[in-house]
Image (tube, rainbow, N blue to C red):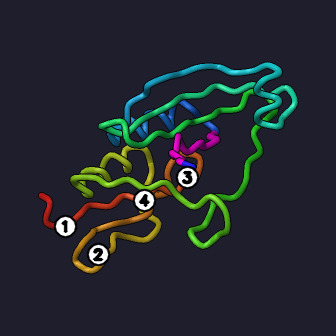
Amino acid sequence: MPITLENVAIAVRDLEATIAFFTDLGLTVIGRQTVSGEWTDTAVGLDGNHAKIAMLETPGGQGHIELFEYIHPDAIETEPTLPNEIGMHRVAFSVDDLDEALAIAAKHGCHPLRGVGTYEDVYRLTYVRGPSGIIVMLAEELGKR
């Protein structure tokens, strides 16, 4: 059976701030909507489900992220995920210029968890704590610039 990854969905506390973060990094908003009704209650498994959503895509349209800000039921705040926790881990992006990407992230108050590492002289990469505690990996392939 063929299978295709459609998108990764992330619940956020502030949709506009999260959109600003990802669009500054180079993603594009390709759709926005507010969803509610019986079909969402059934599909998502939450009674009275009502959310604002935005779909973003990477340049070239290969990757998609769907962001949700819940109107009802109330969003549940949790501790930010740690890199070694079981479950949804991170979203990763290749960037042409890691330093530029980090400067953009910093404008949003988002900084590396520890620093920038180099993997086998192939990549410079880091994990950034993004909006709503999302872990975002940014990686620059060395020798591409």
Q: How crowded is mark 3: few (under 14 residues within 10 Å), some or many (20 or more)?
A: many
For this rendering, which residue is in front, 139 or 15?
139
Q: Give the range drawn in magenta.
A: 2-12
Rate crowding at label 2 as few (under 14), some (14 to 19) or many (20 or more) other CA atoms within 10 Å: some
Q: Residue 142 carries which label?
A: 1
SS category of the residue bearing label 1: loop
Label 2 residue SS = strand
Q: As shown in the figure, which amino acid type bears the numbered disc 2? A: Thr
For label 4, the SS is strand
Residue position marked by numbered label 4 in the rendering: 137
Quadrant of the rendering where the C terminus is positioned = bottom left
Q: Which residue is drawn at 64% across and 25% down?
A: 52
Residue at mark 1 to residue at mark 4: CA–CA distance: 16 Å
Farthest-out residue, bottom:
120
Q: Where is residue 13 in the image (x, y as percent from the top left)?
A: 64, 38
Contact between labelled residues 2 and 1, with CB atoms less than 8 Å apart: yes
Question: Alpha-carbon distance for marks 1 and 2?
Answer: 9 Å
Which residue type carries mark 3? Ile
The rendered magenta stretch, by its main secondary structure, is classed as: loop
CA–CA distance between discs 3 and 1? 25 Å
> For the residue labelled by badge 3, is the local secondary structure a helix, a strand or a loop?
loop
Marked residue nearer the N-terminal end (4 or 2): 2
The residue carrying mark 3 is 134
Number of the label disc, if any, that sits on residue 118: 2
